[in-house]
Image (spheres, rainbow, N blue to C red):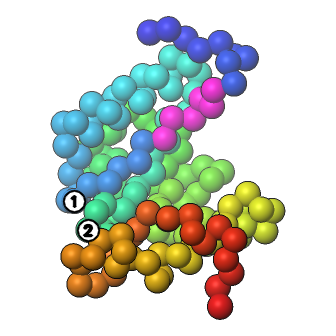
């Protein structure tokens, strides 16, 4: 495995975000964890476990996932059971942090709020009976403010 040079400018924190429907990691997830772990170790980086939310809005419990990673010798530098400077390592428990960052981005003009989807979702997909949870921003709201 080729090592990254120390001046490459690439972050050496390798974050494994687990979004699964159950509390068990699939072989694909375990393979991804192994590659992330090996890449982090080969480049003097950190291997971090973060629990994400799956497509059903459910967050996996970390104990079984951590036990499986431990069983295969994939030690985390940071994560739910390990701790670290950027806790919590659960997406649902970081919502306040994410909201604060969004506010800073909007306040500094690096991001803007999308309001166009509130009115235009029927134009995007006229077949749907009710508004979908997520829609692409049509960028018609770039200069609008919420009224």
Say few, some or many: other residues with alpha carbon within 10 Å of mark 2 (under 14 / 14 to 19 / 20 or more).
Answer: few
Question: Residue placed farthest to the top in the image?
Answer: 2
- Where are the magenta residues, as a range? 10-15
Q: Which residue is mark 2?
A: 56
Rendered residue at 68%/81% (across/down): 145
**Residues at marks 2 and 1 touching, judged by CB atoms closer than 8 Å:** yes
Give the x, y percent position of residue 140: 57, 69
Q: Which residue is mark 1?
A: 21
* Disc number placed over residue 81 in the picture, else none: none
- The quarter of the image holding the N terminus is top left
Residue 74 seen in the figure: yes
Give the mark nearest the N terminus, 2 or 1. 1
Element carrying mark 1: loop
Rendered residue at 18%/36% (across/down): 27
- The quarter of the image holding the C terminus is bottom right
Judge left or right: residue 131 versus residue 117: left
Judge left or right: residue 90 versus residue 5: left
Give the x, y percent position of residue 125: 30, 71
Q: Nearer the viewer, mark 2 or mark 1?
A: 2
Question: Residue placed farthest to the right in the image?
Answer: 108
Residue 111 within the segment the image draws in magenta: no
Looking at the rendering, which quadrant does residue 58 occupy? bottom left
Judge left or right: residue 22 versus residue 139: left
């Amino acid at each position: 495995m080729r090592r990254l040079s120390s001046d490459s400018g690439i972050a050496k924190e390798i974050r494994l975000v687990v979004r699964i429907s159950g509390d068990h990691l699939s072989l694909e997830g375990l393979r991804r964890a192994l590659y992330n772990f090996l890449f982090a170790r080969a480049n003097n980086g950190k291997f971090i476990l973060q629990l994400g939310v799956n497509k059903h809005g459910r967050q996996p419990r970390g104990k079984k996932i951590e036990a499986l990673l431990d069983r295969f010798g994939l030690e985390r530098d940071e994560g739910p059971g390990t701790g670290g400077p950027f806790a919590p390592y659960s997406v649902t428990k970081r919502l306040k942090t994410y909201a604060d960052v969004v506010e800073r981005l909007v306040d500094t003009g690096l991001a803007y709020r999308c309001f166009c989807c509130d009115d235009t979702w029927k134009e995007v997909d006229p077949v749907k009976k009710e508004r979908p949870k997520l829609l692409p921003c049509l960028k018609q709201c770039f200069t609008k403010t919420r009224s």
